[in-house]
Amino acid sequence: MAVSRQEFREAMSRLGAAVNVVTTDGAAGRTGFTASAVCSVTDDPPTLLVCVNRSSKGNALFKANGVLCVNTMASGFGDLSDAFAGKGGLEGEGRFALTQWSTLATGAPVLHEAAIVSFDCRIAEVLEKGTHSVLFAEVEAIRCGKTGRALIYYGRGYHPIGQDAA
């Protein structure tokens, strides 16, 4: 018996995950999206896995630029996450105008106050699987933000997790 798409999506809503704004910049242009499909692959070399929908406008930009930054969101920044998820009608530079950015090693946009940690990466490999491109991204630089509560997505909503900063 096959699992339906709807059944799978409902089950995945019960798998809590960190909320990340994933960004890129380079010759192909600047873009970003909100992702919960991000995880560690290995620590030698430090590598993350990031899934991006193949039908998204930004998919080709990430591949062409060859760089990305995974900005793991701090609690209280659900509105920014929503903007990068396409809610509220903002697109392109309008999303980036909502907050302050900098860069580290690759030139991909790094969030300031909204990220508890940012992983600046170079895309080492791409695997196409079903509806998504799976990006294997080797970490070139890390910026740790303020300690405090992280933002997770669970049950189709945002929730804080962790301890408030002392």
Image (spheres, rainbow, N blue to C red):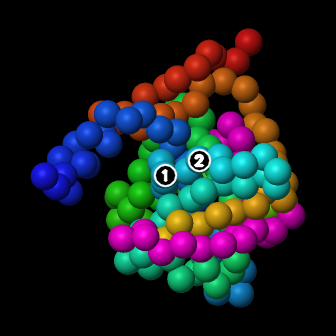
The secondary structure making up most of the magenta span is strand
Q: Which image quarter holds the C terminus?
A: top right
Answer above or below: position of 128 versus 9. below
Farthest top residue in view: 166
Answer above or below: position of 75 versus 114. above
The tag on residue 37 is 1
Res. 158 visible in picture: no
Answer above or below: position of 113 versus 31. above
User: Horizontally, is 26 left or right of 9 in the view?
Assistant: right
The three-letter code of the residue at mark 1 reads Ala
The residue drawn where x is 76% and y is 37% is: 145
Label 2 sits on a secondary structure element that is strand
The tag on residue 149 is none
Looking at the picture, tell me which residue is in the foreground, 137 or 163.
137
The three-letter code of the residue at mark 2 reads Cys
The tag on residue 39 is 2
The residue drawn where x is 57% and y is 59% is: 50
Image x and y of residue 39, in percent: 59, 47
User: Horizontally, is 34 left or right of 137 in the view?
Assistant: left
Q: Answer whether labels 2 and 1 touch (C-beta < 8 Å).
A: yes
The residue drawn where x is 79% and y is 39% is: 144
State the CA–CA distance, disc 2 to disc 1: 7 Å
Label 1 sits on a secondary structure element that is loop
Give the class, few, some or many, for how many residues have Cα within 10 Å of label 1's Cα (few <14, many ≥20).
some
Looking at the picture, tell me which residue is in the foreground, 79 or 115.
115
**Residue numbers of the magenta segment:** 105-132
Res. 135 visible in picture: yes
Image x and y of residue 147, in percent: 72, 26
Image x and y of residue 87, in percent: 35, 57
Image x and y of residue 93, in percent: 56, 72
Assess whether residue 128 is covered by the magenta stretch. yes
The residue drawn where x is 58% and y is 20% is: 162
